[in-house]
Amino acid sequence: MHELSVCESLLRVIKENLPSPDCRVTVVRLRIGRLSTIVPDVMRSAFGIAATDTQAEGAELEIEEVPIRVLCSDCGSRTEMDSPPLICNSCGGTNVTLETGDDLLIESFDVEEPED
């Protein structure tokens, strides 16, 4: 389950970017492409485990699944697909450039400042 190590890295990045070490993370928003090999349901479970005893414990994990989209160099079409092979759905060509689908990005996260 490589999602656990991805979550641990994700939490390190979030911790490094908190406005204060006393903040509590309430929501984390991710963009995960279908080619990233990350399984969203497994990622949610792994996040809960990795976030234990951190500023993100109990935080909600929102995942936007990003489709595979290619640009065809032969016909100029942009097409989406659910899985490889990467081919143009318009002309069937294989001379395509991947535009989205391998994403793994922290879109944003929300924090609560401690009350004094």
Image: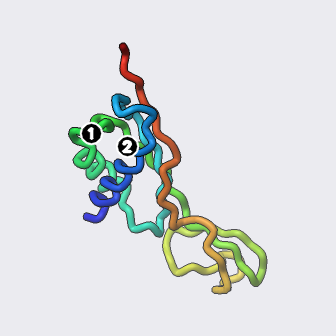
Where residue 106 appears, as percent x and y from the top left, is 48, 50
Quarter placement of the C terminus: top left
Where residue 71 appears, as percent x and y from the top left, is 69, 73
Q: Nearer the viewer, residue 97 or 22?
A: 22
Dot 2: element? helix
Instruction: Name the residue rendered at 55%, 62% in the picture.
Output: 67
* Quarter of the rendering containing residue 73: bottom right
Q: Which mark is residue 12?
A: none
Drawn side of residue 65 relative to residue 72, left or right: left
Tell me the kind of residue under disc 1: Thr
Q: Which residue is mark 1?
A: 54
Drawn side of residue 72 relative to residue 87, left or right: right
Instruction: Name the residue rendered at 39%, 68% in the picture.
Output: 37
Q: Which residue is mark 2?
A: 15
Judge the density around disc 2: few (<14), some (14-19), many (≥20) Cα neighbours within 10 Å. Answer: some
Quarter placement of the N terminus: bottom left
Tell me the kind of residue under disc 2: Lys
Where residue 59 appears, as percent x and y from the top left, is 34, 36
Give the mark nearer the N terminus: 1 vs 2.
Answer: 2
